[in-house]
Image: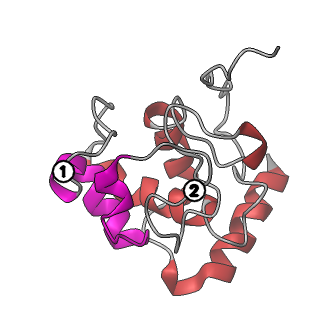
Amino acid sequence: MRLWKLSLAATLVACGPAMAAGDAQKGADVFHDHCDFCHSFRLEDGNGTGPNLSGLAGRKAGTFADFEYSAAMKNSGIVWNAQTLTQFIQAPDTVVPGTKMVGFRRVDAEDIDDLIAYLMAAGSPEAAPTGNLAPPAGATPAPQSPGPPTP
């Protein structure tokens, strides 16, 4: 637990003003509750139902390798930062009509800043490629989509 806090603190300091105003540690719990069934930050996890989020901060939407994005996401022109992530998480179908990110459990308004702080920290270039700075306390790994059968 202590190592996780040190890693998170170092990332937050390194990212400085680019970080969201929320509490990234609380955001890790929000991510676990709402996002990690479909997404991971660890490159070795690959893509799940949703794309891998390693290096998310500053990345153009629809560009992570080996994920089949909707045409709408590929052509959205979005670059992920605190503002664009907030807008997308609050209303994905409005921000990117035709997105594949539908039917997810909505994040409560009071949790958005915390989630964004975590996404920007764990998805920062400084955190990549190791991704998840740490799982929330007591978390169990989310099931990942099975890959293709091996011959």
The answer to which of marks 1 and 2 sits earlier in the sequence is 2
Can you say whether 10 is above or below 137 in the image? below
State the image coordinates of residue 106 (x, y, percent, origin top left). 28, 37
Magenta residues, dominant SS class? helix
Q: Is residue 79 left or right of residue 56?
A: left
Tell which of 132 and 138 is nearer to you.
132
Q: Is residue 94 left or right of residue 24?
A: left
The part of the chain drawn in magenta is 70-95
**Amino acid on which the number 1 mark rests in the picture:** Pro
State the image coordinates of residue 50 (x, y, percent, origin top left). 49, 39
Tell which of 88 and 30 is nearer to you.
88
Q: Is residue 74 magenta?
A: yes
Determine the residue positioned at 63% across, 25% down.
144
Quadrant of the rendering where the C terminus is positioned: top right
What numbered label is drawn on residue 24? none
Q: Is residue 81 left or right of residue 2?
A: left
Which quadrant would residue 107 be assigned to in this image?
A: top left
Determine the residue positioned at 77% across, 59% down.
129
The residue that mark 1 highlights is 97
Determine the residue positioned at 67% across, 27% down.
138
Could you classify mark 1 by the number of other residues whose Cα lies within 10 Å: few (under 14), some (14-19), or many (20 or more)?
Answer: few
Considering every residue shown, the one lying at the far left of the view is: 94
Can you say whether 67 is above or below 126 in the image? above
**Amino acid on which the number 2 mark rests in the picture:** Phe
Determine the residue positioned at 55% across, 39% down.
39
Could you classify mark 2 by the number of other residues whose Cα lies within 10 Å: few (under 14), some (14-19), or many (20 or more)?
Answer: some
SS at badge 2: loop
Q: CA distance from mark 1 to mark 2?
A: 19 Å
State the image coordinates of residue 70 (x, y, percent, origin top left). 35, 46
Quadrant of the rendering where the N terminus is positioned: top right
What numbered label is drawn on residue 64? 2
